[in-house]
Amino acid sequence: MSYFRKHDPLNSVLDILKLNTPAGKALVQYHMAVMRQQSDLSIQEREWIAAYVSGLNHCHYCHGVHSVTAREFGVEPELLEALLQEVETAPIEAKMKPLFRLVKQLTEDPARMTNALVDKVLEAGWSEQAVHDAINVCCLFNFMNRLLEGHGIKGRADLYEERGKALQKNGYDPLLTALSQVDAV
């Protein structure tokens, strides 16, 4: 249930994007560029970061959907949960830890970002492009978490499962198609 009365029901990302279709289309195109274009980070890694950021922010909708998407791309749910508890003790590949430390810092206290955080990611074997791409995913989902929470969208487990699987299968294109149909009406 959304915080909005005039536009009720607002139950999903698409419902919010329909409130301003030009902005909605631009935002979906940004999702497509950040999450599905060629990158030094795999789609799996980007969806994992999206789920992680959303978990840090306690955004149930985005965390729920992107946890399912990450799972569908091969991320074990236990790894995501362990990571949310503590990066240092999470049983993940050592190369991933500096990347998640950077994302955590950028999410929780961006003014305290340091060159040392970036250097650690580079020393772990990631390229500067991978760092840039991780920052983009992190920023995008901090934005999306606030967009959903600001509108009061929480979702439900069955919806997360449905949307997460659809996102893995079809990407973000169906959102853009749906917004184009709004303009045609």
Image: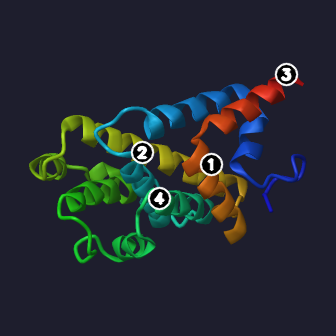
Who comes first in sequence, dot 2 or dot 3?
2
> Residue 59's spot in the image, x, y percent?
57, 63
Q: Is residue 69 visible?
A: yes
Say which of 175 and 107 sits in front.
175
Q: Name the mark nearer the viewer: 4 or 1.
A: 4
Query: Looking at the rendering, in which quadrant would you find the N terminus?
Result: bottom right
Query: Looking at the rendering, in which quadrant would you find the C terminus?
Result: top right
| Residue at position x 55%, y 63% in the image | 68
Q: CA distance from mark 2 to mark 1?
A: 15 Å
Say which of 85 and 47 sits in front.
47
Instruction: Name the residue carrying label 3.
Output: 184
Mark 1: amino acid:
Leu
Mark 3: amino acid:
Ala
Instruction: Name the residue carrying label 1.
Output: 147
Mark 2: few, some, or many residues within 10 Å (few <14, many ≥20)? Answer: many
Q: CA distance from mark 2 to mark 3?
A: 31 Å
| Residue at position x 71%, y 68% in the image | 158
- The label number, if any, that marks residue 137 in the structure image: 2
The colour style of the image is rainbow
Q: Is residue 156 visible?
A: no
In which image quadrant can residue 134 be found? top left
Q: Name the mark nearer the viewer: 2 or 1.
A: 2
Depicted 103 relative to depicted 85: above or below:
above
> Residue 183's spot in the image, x, y percent?
81, 24
Q: Name the mark nearer the viewer: 4 or 2.
A: 4
Say which of 2 and 47 sits in front.
47
Q: Name the mark nearer the viewer: 2 or 3.
A: 3
- Judging from the image, what secondary structure is the residue with disc 3 in? helix
Q: Are marks 4 and 2 in contact (CB under 8 Å)?
A: no
Instruction: Name the residue carrying label 4.
Output: 70
Q: Are marks 3 and 4 in contact (CB under 8 Å)?
A: no
